[in-house]
Structures are given as C-alpha cells and as structure tokens.
Amino acid sequence: MARTFDEILKELNSDDAKVVQSAIDKRITGAIKTYSIQHPQPEERLAKINERIANIEKAKLEREAQFDLKVFAIEECYAKGVKFEIVSDLLPLFKDKESLGSKIDTLAQLSKENDLKRINDELANNSYKPGGGSHSENDPLDRIRRNLPPGDLAEFDKTVNRTRR
C-alpha cells in the first residue's frame, strides 16, 4: 500500500524530516512555477482571446467596407457607362465612396470625350470628298475596275449597270 509524505515524515527524526520537507518544498515550488508558465492565468488567456476577436472584427469590417466600395463602383460604372474593368484595378487605392465616385466621374467624362473625338475623326475621314464619285475607296467594284485591262472596262460597266436596274 502506498504511503503519504506525512506518514514518511512522522517516522523520521526531526532533523531528517526538516531536510526532506525542504527538498519536497523546493520540488513543489518548481512544479508550480513550471505549471504557471505552461498554463497562463485565465485573465491572460482571456486578454489574448479578446485581442484576437478584436483583430477578426477589424478584418471583417475592412472586408465589408471593400465589398461595399466594390458594389458602389459597379453601380456607378454601370450608371455612367464606364467599363468596370478600368476601375476594378484601382479599388484598393480608395477608402471612401466620395473619392471613388469623383474618379469614376472623371473617367466617364474622359470616355465621353474620347468617344466624341473618335466619332468626329471617323466622320471627318469618311465624309464626302470632291471628285470621288458615288463610290467609296473600299467599294469592291472599284477594286475590280482597277485590276481590269482598259478594253474590258466598258463591258464591265455595262454589265454592272444592267444588273442594278
């Protein structure tokens, strides 16, 4: 049967009991220190857990804000006729809707100016040119006429005029 320390100490004389008790106390003190290092106090653990929860909440709020900003950007781009692909790469640079909205407005204005310039250039390049006749430069019949020998040109024109009637 196993005996307790108290039973063992009672059988020893007082000097030996003091030495054994001192050794037992040192070992118990060391064990308590080791335990407290390996198992932090509940308050410390609670503080660490609360810090982790706060970090998770902060990250969640940042993600929600980025999501809201992305939804706002998609809606604004659609409303203003700007391609979202242009704005999507710029989203991480913006923290609020106002600055993003002003940038989308600027892009929409630039897009409209670019479209207007392109339309004006196209109209300027394809408008009426004196001496050009009723055929444009890309007319397939003109390409055929250029490749025909001069003797066959009159016959070709008669055939074309007959088929257009």
Image: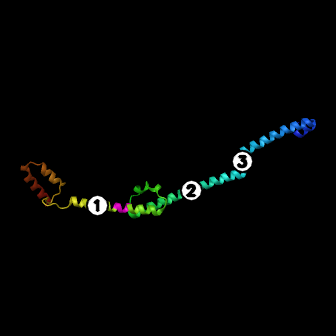
Tell whether label 1 touches label 3 (CB within 8 Å). Answer: no
Residue 19 place in picture, x, y as percent: 87, 36
Which residue is located at x 81 percent, y 41 percent? 28
Spatial CA span between label 3 and label 1: 71 Å
Residue 123 place in picture, x, y as percent: 23, 61
146 lies left or right of 80 = left
Between 130 and 55, the one lying in front of the other is 55
Tell whether label 1 touches label 2 (CB within 8 Å). Answer: no
Give the residue type at disc 2: Lys
The tag earlier along the polypeptide, 3 or 1, is 3
Magenta span: 107-111
Q: Which quarter of the rendered picture does the C terminus lie within?
A: bottom left
Residue 34 place in picture, x, y as percent: 74, 42
Which residue is located at x 11 percent, y 58 percent? 161
Judged by its main secondary structure, the magenta piece is helix
Question: Is residue 110 magenta-colored?
Answer: yes
Tell whether label 2 touches label 3 (CB within 8 Å). Answer: no
Spatial CA span between label 3 and label 2: 28 Å
Question: Is residue 75 magenta-colored?
Answer: no
95 lies left or right of 114 = right
Give the residue number, with chain letter if any, for mark 2. 60
Give the residue number, with chain letter if any, for mark 3. 40
The tag earlier along the polypeptide, 2 or 1, is 2
Name the mark on residue 42: none
Give the residue number, with chain letter if any, for mark 1. 117
Which residue is located at x 77 percent, y 41 percent? 31
Give the residue type at disc 1: Lys
Q: Which quarter of the rendered picture does the N terminus lie within?
A: top right
Report crowding for label 1: few under 14, some 14 to 19, many 20 or more residues within 10 A (C-alpha).
few
